[in-house]
Image (tube, rainbow, N blue to C red):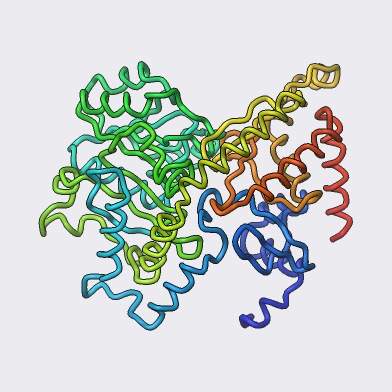
Amino acid sequence: MLYQIDEVEKLSRSEIRKLYSEYVNPGLASMLGLLNFDKNFIRAEGCYVWDSEGNKYIDFLGAYGALNLGHNPREVREALNKVSSRPNLLQASLSTYAAVLGHNLSEVAPQGLKHCFFCNSGAEAVEGALKAARAATGKHKIISCEGSFHGKTMGALSATGRKKYQTPFSPLVPGFETAEYGNLDDLERKLKSKDVAAFIVEPIQGEGGIIIPPEGYLKGAGELCRRYEALLIVDEIQTGFGRTGRMFACEAEGITPDIMCVAKSLGGGIMPAGAFITTLEVWEKAFGGMEKCLLHTSTFGGNTMACAAGIASINAIVENKLPERAGEMGRYMLDGLKVMKDRYSMIKDVRGRGLMVGIEFETAEKGLLNRITGGAVNKFYREFTGAMVAGELLNGHRIITAYTLNNPNVIRLEPPLIITKEDIDYLLNALEDIFSKNSDLFKLTFRTVKTVAGSLFSR
């Protein structure tokens, strides 16, 4: 039996759970089901989504920075309608829309970045950037940062700084090392041998827990790369297109990297789209001329619909001044969270820039139970406190969030850049309610256990 589209829309939540578990990822289905995260969302617009029972939710996750314009933005949908009858995949010509998107991306990128390669995701953009660096320099060593996240394909994973995601796939691509994030002395020690092709770095570590490096770190890293003849790759996949209060986060320090990776909101929240963009010098060394122009290619990268979405997305972000709006709304959110931090000991830290904000929770329990379990209680809280708070927000207040992959006791707040102060106030009031009712970790755990039990018995 093959399902038709009309039949898909009629599936119940339990039927979807069963199909996903049998044919996609059973472990993920079980994990999301335990905390009642496997709701059947059927409609989305702007900052909001609705489930099959008619409940409205505010999306403060924003697909990890892919929804800067919100869900199903009108400008992007209209652009896709305009190109719906054009050839989408036709390699035997030059794509008009790829040419225009390349121009527009160069216009808004840090000055000096010019040549683009279009792909389908952030991980692909990183893969291409790493290849470009090796081809341009003739060197093979890549330095990334501890706690970083650059994707889960083989090359990108080799640059990602958490062993949990690397160990099952060892051996990884050779030639990768890590340096401490924010530590220029450590970076210089790794660069001194002059055998490094590139240093790849996030302006703000997203999956690392919304970590902001010391002021001047990116600029200093660029200077060290020039001194020791390595390229600087800036990964703006999550921070780009207005998220941090500027079009690109690296602009806060006035730098132009040799290569920049983008994705997520490039596709306007509808089309998968990614790219890396390089200086003229790097491109000419890596891919210049007819002999090298086909060294790196993609069947779907740069297709008409993805590029049309990218053109519309960039224009909407610029015309609506969303970087400035993100800066204003982000300051408003952080101010409210900092007041809350002073009142509740469960909150260890709040930090961020623009609408890329993290809340880190205290996870140390010094009581008898932790001692007699040999520290197992604290280990549990380090892995699951963020998930428990996210569960309370979703099930108690209909707010969508998630923890950061490399630091699971941090929940991220990355709503669409069109979010309003009223919605931010609703979030702050929800968090106030959660922390006032759960003054310690045991109370929060008890409420989570009730949610898990309810989810299991409802199946």
Return the residue nearer the eye: 79 or 284.
79
Q: Is residue 416 left or right of residue 273?
A: right
Q: Is residue 369 left or right of residue 233?
A: right
**Residue depicted at x 28% and y 32%:** 141
On the image, the x and y values in percent for residue 273 come to: 41, 59
Would residue 388 be visible to someone looking at this image? Answer: no
Q: Say above or below: 142 vs 4.
A: above
Q: Quadrant of the N terminus?
A: bottom right
Return the residue nearer the eye: 170 or 258.
258
**Residue depicted at x 38% and y 25%:** 217
Q: Is residue 293 left or right of residue 235?
A: left
**Residue depicted at x 21% and y 74%:** 93
Q: How many marks?
A: 0
Q: Say above or below: 257 vs 184.
A: below
On the image, the x and y values in percent for residue 166 come to: 49, 38
Q: Quadrant of residue 198?
A: top left
On the image, the x and y values in percent for residue 132 come to: 25, 45
Return the residue nearer the eye: 272 or 426.
426
Would residue 362 be visible to someone looking at this image? Answer: yes
Q: Is residue 200 left or right of residue 363?
A: left
Q: Quadrant of the C terminus?
A: bottom right
Q: Say above or below: 197 vs 22.
A: above
